């Protein structure tokens, strides 16, 4: 079984008036306030917002980790009730199993599906070679750099061929150069595998560079403040980052975010 | 497959971690003298020797400071006792009997404590049901268990094993619970998200994640099991290093008491080390943090 032989359709995500509360009684906090969001099949959407606004909560809800308090959340018309391998999550700090080698980490999803040892080895090795980690299959996660760890985390999710890829500020702990490499790698994988991607970030450049569409959230409790399409042509190369169109979109986004900060300050 | 992404991505060989890995890999196979380990061993050995000298002097000159060394046998006298004892087959029988009791008690304790600890750490109901009675039993010292141990079991041998079991059980239990409770929750979430069912979460995440704590608990439990050996072998018997120590006390053979004590110490240390060592073999990925020393 090769990565490209398994064809799964990308999924659509629909959030209709999704509310999420945390805690109980007096310490009850509203994290999400009636979020409406529709992500189309194969779309790459970034969710941008001030830190602590509840961006990650959206990921947690779609992944099925965080139960919603109100509204309706569906992936491919199915109501989300629990986590599952059809929705792959890449966390901010890698959540690789420290006791498993790189190869065993990537194999995990296939093992859970009952794929034979030989077959899952082959598939995992193939994807690792593909993302440039072929020499590191027998290393343990702590022996790798931050960028390599996130690449393994991505491979571990992609081996399941998820319909939806959920990324929660996955590159924010990396240095600028590595981050750009990772962004290019993500775009390239997305181009090959055509899954739907929701990418949460607080980095405006990252959001604009990657996405088809950017969603800007308000301060907590998070509501959708604005959303706009990124019309930059694909495939995108780092050269885009200095184009006038990019700068214009970046300015527009920054203004929205600054406005949000002023509202809080006032 | 399309053109591989690998060509577009440098392999981060410039990062310190990657450089370290490359260095370690290229150095593998070249024999090196482990100076650090050797000097550590030398310090430990010298320290032990100095303590022995100090003890010898204290007993020989019958120091009377805060404690009286008047009746304490000197190391040289203990060595004489060692010589006497090693000549007889009895010593071997003492040691073998004790090792067997500790081994059986420890093994049963390990299985039950790790099993109960995993359940208590993972499930609220298990913790609510099992923890209160166990917390009540925990502070009870091994000596206090003797009458119950005798009543519970028909054979004295079983009663003794039971006492060594009690000694090993609680450290192993508490460390297992701790290991499960301090496990990174995201690893559990990640595994479920990757398709793991409840049983797979246990086998693939909870157990290996708690393993460092479990090994610590087992190693401490091994020590406390030996700790309770004298108590256990007070129950009865003719053989056992604890029994030997206790008998030496009742017969006022002081060098033999010390010999018994030291034997228990060495056996306990050795078996704890064995537990830790085999634990490390199971966890090639585990890196204890020793950078502060």
Image (cartoon, rainbow, N blue to C red):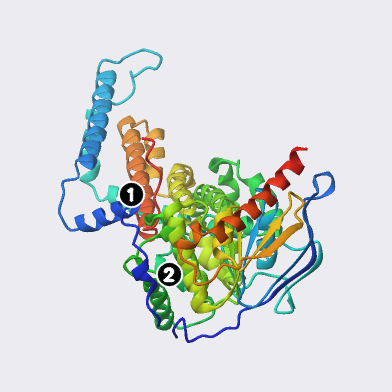
In this picture, residue A241 sits left or right of residue B134: left
**Can you tell which of label 2 and label 1 is closer to the viewer?**
1
Q: Residues within 10 Å of mark 2 (few under 14, many from 20)?
A: many
> Which residue occupies the foreground of this view, B158 or B67?
B67
In this picture, residue A10 sits left or right of residue A192: right
- Where residue B246 appears, as percent x and y from the top left, is 41, 38
Chain letter for mark 2: A
> Which residue occupies the foreground of this view, B133 or B173?
B173
**Is B155 located above or below residue A27 in the figure?**
below
* Residue lying at 46% horizontally and 73% vertically, measured from the top left: A107
Q: Which residue is mark 2?
A: A104
**Is A171 located above or below residue B1 in the figure?**
above
Q: Is residue B110 visible?
A: no
User: Tag 2, which secondary structure?
Assistant: helix
Q: Which residue is mark 1?
A: B16
In the rendered image, which quarter contains the C terminus of chain A?
top right
Q: Is residue B285 visible?
A: yes
- Where residue A51 appears, as percent x and y from the top left, is 65, 48
* Residue lying at 69% horizontally and 57% vertically, measured from the top left: A216
């Amino acid at each position: 079984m090769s990565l490209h032989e398994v064809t799964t359709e990308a999924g659509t995500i629909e959030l209709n008036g999704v509310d999420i509360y945390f805690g109980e009684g007096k310490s009850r906090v509203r994290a999400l306030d009636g979020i409406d969001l529709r992500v189309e099949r194969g779309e790459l959407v970034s969710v941008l917002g001030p830190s602590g606004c509840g961006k990650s909560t959206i990921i947690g809800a779609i992944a099925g980790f965080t139960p919603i308090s109100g509204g309706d959340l569906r992936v491919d018309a199915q109501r989300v009730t629990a986590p599952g391998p059809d929705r792959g999550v890449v966390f901010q700090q890698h959540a690789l199993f420290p006791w498993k080698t790189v190869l065993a980490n990537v194999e995990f999803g296939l093992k859970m599906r009952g794929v034979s040892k030989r077959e899952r080895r082959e598939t995992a090795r193939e994807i690792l070679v593909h993302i440039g980690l072929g020499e590191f299959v027998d290393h343990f996660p702590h022996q790798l750099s931050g960028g390599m760890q996130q690449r393994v985390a991505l491979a571990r999710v992609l081996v399941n061929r998820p319909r939806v890829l959920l990324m929660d500020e996955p590159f924010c702990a990396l240095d600028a150069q590595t981050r750009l490499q990772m962004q290019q790698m993500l775009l390239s994988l997305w181009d090959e595998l055509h899954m739907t991607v929701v990418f949460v970030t607080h980095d405006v450049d990252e959001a604009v560079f990657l996405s088809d569409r950017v969603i800007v959230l308000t301060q907590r409790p998070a509501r959708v403040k604005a959303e706009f399409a990124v019309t930059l042509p694909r495939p995108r190369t780092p050269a885009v980052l200095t184009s006038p169109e990019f700068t214009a979109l970046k300015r527009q986004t920054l203004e929205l975010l600054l406005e949000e900060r002023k509202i809080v300050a006032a | 497959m399309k053109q591989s992404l690998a060509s577009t991505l440098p392999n981060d060989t410039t990062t310190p971690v990657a450089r370290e890995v490359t260095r370690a890999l290229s150095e593998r196979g070249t024999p090196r003298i482990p100076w650090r380990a050797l000097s550590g061993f030398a310090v430990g050995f010298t320290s032990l020797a100095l303590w022995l000298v100090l003890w010898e002097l204290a007993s020989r000159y019958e120091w009377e400071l805060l404690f009286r060394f008047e009746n304490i046998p000197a190391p040289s006298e203990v060595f004489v006792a060692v010589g006497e004892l090693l000549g007889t087959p009895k010593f071997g029988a003492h040691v073998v009997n004790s090792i067997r009791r500790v081994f059986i008690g420890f093994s049963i304790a390990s299985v039950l404590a790790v099993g109960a600890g995993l359940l208590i750490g993972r499930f609220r109901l298990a913790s609510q049901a099992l923890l209160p009675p166990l917390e009540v039993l925990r502070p009870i010292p091994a000596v206090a268990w003797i009458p119950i141990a005798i009543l519970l079991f028909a054979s004295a041998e079983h009663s003794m094993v039971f006492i060594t079991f009690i000694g090993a059980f609680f450290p192993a239990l508490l460390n297992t619970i701790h290991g499960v409770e301090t496990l990174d929750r995201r690893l559990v979430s990640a595994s479920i998200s990757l398709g793991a069912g409840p049983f797979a979460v246990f086998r693939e995440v909870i157990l290996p994640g708690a393993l460092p704590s479990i090994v610590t608990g087992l190693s401490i439990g091994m020590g406390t099991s030996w700790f309770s050996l004298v108590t256990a072998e007070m129950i009865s018997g003719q053989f056992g290093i604890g029994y030997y120590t206790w008998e030496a006390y009742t017969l006022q053979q002081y060098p033999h008491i010390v010999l018994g004590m030291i034997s228990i110490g060495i056996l306990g240390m050795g078996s704890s080390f064995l537990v830790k060592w085999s634990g490390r073999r199971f966890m090639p990925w585990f890196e204890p943090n020793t950078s502060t020393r």
